[in-house]
Image: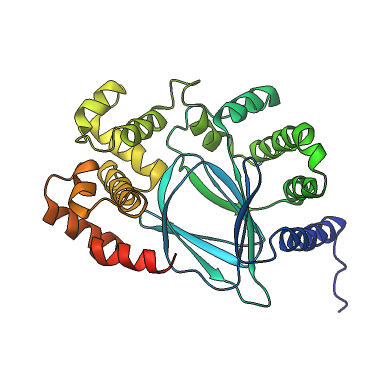
Amino acid sequence: MASQAPTFEGQGALLNRQELVERISRSLPQDGHVEAFPGLVLFRSSAVDKTAFSVMEPAFCVIAQGSKEIRVGDEVLRYDPGHYLITTVGLPTVGRIVEASTDRPYLGLRLNLDPALVASYTLESGIETRKSDSAVRAVDVKPIENNLLDAVVRMIRLLDRPQDVKALTPLIFKEIIFRLLLEGQGSRLRHLTAEQDPSRRISRAIKEVRENISEPLKIEDMARRLGMSVSGFHHQFKSVTSMSPVQFQRQLRLQEARRLMLGEDLDAASAGVRVGYGDPSYFNREYKKHFGAPPQRDIAKLRSNL
């Protein structure tokens, strides 16, 4: 039986992926990352990554070649050239490139999602979103449709026409948001419009935890301020972040302590106190459990790799 000829859409997707590989390779000939223009970051790696801990800010991520996985709470998500990743709140994550080689390096991009622009473009689109679904998970991996991929490629083409970036980037970004809305990402994108939409209670809670990272987490008080029961708050928070409020705060604290030790040269005890740990030995145990080594050894290893 003769094989079925590829559809025009299938051919278009293949060509778009090939073009994306070529253009990212040309813009980033060596391993590393670069902000191609404000809000757009390109990545390249010729080897699988060691585990990387970070707080992943709201973004739309596409892979041109290779694959990557991230862990959010207890959940592991993997994506590749056929899928995109979207996250709409700042989440502590553990990431790792799982497919890369010298001949076929990992190539990807991250487009930061500006809350004000997302709110404006969502309103302009006229597409209705489900206002009641406040507990939708903030991170998602989904197959990438060719129309969405095509918009990404057109944005990357602007690297060859820097004089067009200022005028055309907002138009292409608006199209990307529109196509994400068409694909049912409206409820997830609403996490970004928390200030414009008082009903986004979990987004407000996440913002409060992040802004008061060293303060004790008073679940009952927070739930009451948000007009929620304690059990309802716990359930919705975990639905959005894949973590309990306590897990979320703990991971944020440990990652901030690591940044303080590495970037501001604080000792472990001072960093622990800065992020809310009053007991140095408890901080050391929690740090080792999360990062796999006690603070002093972990920071020394990180510095040796710089």
Which residue shows up at 47% across the image and 42% down it?
138
42 vs 97, left or right, is: right
Which colour style is shown? rainbow
Q: Do we see residue 292 in this rendering?
A: no
Farthest residue, direction front: 265
Q: Which of 62 and 30 is in front in this view?
A: 30
Q: Where is residue 139 in the image (x, y as percent from the top left)?
A: 49, 47
Q: In this view, does 189 lie above or below 80?
A: above
If the image is split into quadrants, where does the N terminus sit? bottom right
Residue at image location 53% in from the left, 72% down from the top: 48
Looking at the image, residue 116 lies above or below residue 71: above
Q: Position of residue 234 (x, y in %)?
A: 28, 38
Is residue 111 among the parts visible in the rendering? Answer: yes
Front-most of residues 264 and 189: 264
Query: How many dots with numbers?
Result: 0
Q: Which residue is found at the position 54% from the left and 63% from the top?
A: 68
Q: Nearer the viewer, residue 70 or 295?
A: 295
Across and down, in percent, residue 104 comes to 67, 74
The quadrant holding residue 231 is top left
Residue 45: image location, x then y, percent: 59, 67
Please say if 251 is above or below 27: above
Instruction: Judge from the rendering whether residue 43 lies leftward or rightward of residue 19; answer left or right.
Output: left
Q: Quadrant of the C terminus?
A: bottom left
